[in-house]
């Protein structure tokens, strides 16, 4: 049995600050139909099992697997819903193919953020009920605490973090799926309103609605379906010490470990040399820098310099978030990791339109589940 | 408001909420931790002699080696500001009249997230020594809010 697993179809819907006409089920349906057309499969006949990723409280429901099969074509098929980021779903789909039991798997994640009216309260429920929650603090304070310690330990500057915002929002100008594209100056970012100083409002990815569906296939099936398979060469995930009391406030060791697992599987020794570009989590601007360092693209404290020097620009040595990232595209909550992976797939297929990178063969995608978590996924994809 | 939202033909939405009420049991170590705050105004930790780690707040087990921890220690009265932030928004996303100063205060090898008080912003720095200010003993209930805030040590 082949050990290779490919992404053979991708579809998306929404990618807007609000989608008042559509239900989340209709967003999922629209994305699924596109993914099945892209893969050239009939979901009712061909897809053998389905994975959806969601967080009940984001949906305003409980037991979300009751809400997912129909609009994906998954009724009366093996279906399960997992909590996590969309890339956790990609990892799960990968494993399902590798069991040998399934040759075609659907993975879905989405956001209907515009319907969530009390997000800080939901996020507060991910913190310790007796140690943290009674303080009644807007959960962005956790990002502020992390950013301040990150700057302190690595000598990264607020200007370098702001440079991430300028880059990603400018990249987004070439992405029709991006809702928050802008041509800003460093000063405009730095002089914006503070949220949790040193973290400013412009450095926080705004929320958007959207759905992403991917079809995964065994190598044998992929060869039959497409001449543009995108291979999942390695995928790893990790949770750090999660409590606020025992975590590392400056570093992201969970991403470091997830990357180690993914690189080992993909046979990557020097990610900066062997990988052509990356889509990484930029929920907060400083996270892009912290994540690049944890991914081993550079040493701690160097990502800000690389950004200032233009190395992570689309025409730089190692382009990062050509799509615009979550800062430019909008943050899709549980769907964010799959949105980053979508860009990597489009780039590797040569279908990224005006923002297409030249001669790319290996792409990196990384996700983080947001505050207060230390939960992340890393995958290496290639064409 | 976007054009789409103003469209009279746009579908309505249904508003809902989830009436979730629950208990939480903090456990054997947590009970003793909060009892020491309430009765003695002390912050307790537990030590893993094998890993040489002092957990604050006290836990029943070492998350590194999974040993059960039986050695209780007083975390002391002075902690260090490990990182801090100025929080400008409340839980509803509204602007606060004055930002709240929130810190992670290092105690032992762990620490506590809490507010800072009696401090001037231009005097505050990472590494500053701070101490907890407790509510009067009679008003304490065995909660993290029995600590009003941390303040600089003279």
Image (cartoon, coloured by chain):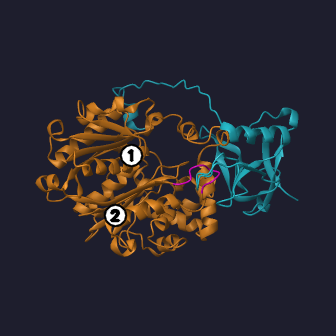
Chain colours: A orange, B cyan
* Residue B99 in the image, given as x and y percentages of width and height: 70, 48
Q: In the image, A244: left or right of B125?
A: left
Q: Residues within 10 Å of mark 2 (few under 14, many from 20)?
A: some
Q: Identify the disc placed on residue A230.
A: none
Note whether A166 is above or below A113 in the view shown: below
Which one is nearer the viewer's eye here, A288 or A103? Answer: A103
Q: In the image, A381: left or right of B5?
A: left
Q: CA distance from mark 1 to mark 2?
A: 24 Å
Instruction: Give me the residue at 36% from left, 76% from top.
Output: A273
Mark 1 or 2, closer to the camera: 2
Q: In the image, A251: left or right of A97?
A: right
Q: Label 2: chain?
A: A
Magenta-tinted stretch: A240-247
Sequence order check: which comes first, mark 1 or mark 2?
A: 2
Note whether B5 is above or below A207 in the view shown: above
Which quadrant of the structure image shows residue A341? bottom left
For disc 1, the marked residue is: A335
**Res. A134 visible in picture:** no
**Res. B138 visible in picture:** yes
For the image, the number of numbered tags is 2
Q: Which element type, helix, strand or loop, lies under badge 2?
A: helix
For disc 2, the marked residue is: A265
Magenta segment, prevailing SS (helix, strand or loop): loop
Q: Quadrant of the N terminus of chain A?
A: bottom left
* Residue A330 in the image, given as x and y percentages of width and height: 42, 49
Magenta highlight on residue B15:
no
Which quadrant of the structure image shows residue B25? top right
């Amino acid at each position: 049995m082949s050990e290779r697993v490919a992404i053979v179809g991708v579809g998306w819907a929404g990618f807007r600050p609000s989608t008042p006409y559509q239900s989340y089920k209709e967003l999922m349906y629209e994305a699924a139909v596109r993914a099945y057309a892209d893969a050239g499969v009939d979901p009712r006949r061909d897809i053998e099992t389905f994975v959806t990723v969601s967080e009940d409280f984001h949906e305003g429901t409980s037991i979300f697997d009751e809400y997912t099969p129909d609009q994906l074509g998954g009724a009366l098929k093996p279906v399960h819903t997992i909590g996590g980021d969309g890339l956790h779903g990609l990892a799960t789909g990968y494993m399902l193919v590798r069991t040998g039991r399934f040759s075609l798997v659907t993975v879905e994640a989405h956001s209907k953020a515009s319907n969530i009216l009390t997000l800080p309260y939901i996020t507060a429920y991910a913190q310790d009920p007796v140690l943290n929650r009674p303080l009644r603090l807007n959960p962005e304070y956790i990002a502020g605490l992390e950013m301040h310690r990150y700057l302190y330990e690595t000598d990264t500057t607020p200007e370098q973090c702001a440079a991430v915002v300028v880059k990603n929002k400018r990249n987004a100008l070439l992405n029709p799926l991006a809702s928050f594209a802008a041509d800003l100056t460093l000063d405009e970012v730095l002089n914006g309103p503070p949220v949790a100083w040193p973290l400013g409002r412009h450095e926080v990815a705004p929320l958007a609605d959207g759905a992403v569906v991917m079809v995964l296939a065994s190598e044998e099936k992929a060869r039959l379906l497409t001449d543009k398979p995108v291979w999942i060469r390695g995928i790893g995930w990790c949770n750090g010490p999660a409590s606020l009391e025992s975590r590392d406030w400056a570093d992201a060791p969970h991403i470091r470990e997830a990357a180690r697992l993914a690189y080992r599987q993909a046979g990557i020794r020097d990610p900066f040399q062997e990988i052509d570009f990356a889509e990484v989590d930029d929920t907060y601007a400083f996270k892009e820098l912290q994540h690049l360092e944890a991914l081993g693209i550079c040493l701690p404290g160097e990502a800000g310099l690389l950004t200032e020097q233009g190395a992570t620009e689309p025409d730089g040595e190692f382009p990062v978030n050509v799509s615009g990232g979550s800062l430019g595209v909008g943050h899709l909550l549980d769907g964010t990791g799959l949105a980053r992976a979508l860009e990597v797939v489009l780039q590797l297929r040569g279908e990224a339109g005006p923002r297409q990178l030249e001669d790319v063969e290996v792409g990196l995608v990384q996700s983080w589940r947001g505050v207060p978590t230390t939960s992340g996924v890393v995958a290496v994809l290639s064409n | 408001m976007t054009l789409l939202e103003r469209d009279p033909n746009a579908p309505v939405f249904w508003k809902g909420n989830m009436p979730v009420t629950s208990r939480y049991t903090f456990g054997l170590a947590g009970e003793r931790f909060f009892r020491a705050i309430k009765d003695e105004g002390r912050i307790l930790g537990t030590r893993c002699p094998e890993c040489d780690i002092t957990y604050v707040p006290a836990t029943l087990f070492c998350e590194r080696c999974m040993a059960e921890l039986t050695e209780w220690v007083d975390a002391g009265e002075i902690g260090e500001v490990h990182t801090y932030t100025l929080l400008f928004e409340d839980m509803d996303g509204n602007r606060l009249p004055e930002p709240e100063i929130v810190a992670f205060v290092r105690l032992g090898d762990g620490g506590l997230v809490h507010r800072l008080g009696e401090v001037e912003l231009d005097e505050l720095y990472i590494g500053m020594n701070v101490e907890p200010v407790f509510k009067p003993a009679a008003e304490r209930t065995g909660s993290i809010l029995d600590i009003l805030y941390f303040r600089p040590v003279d």
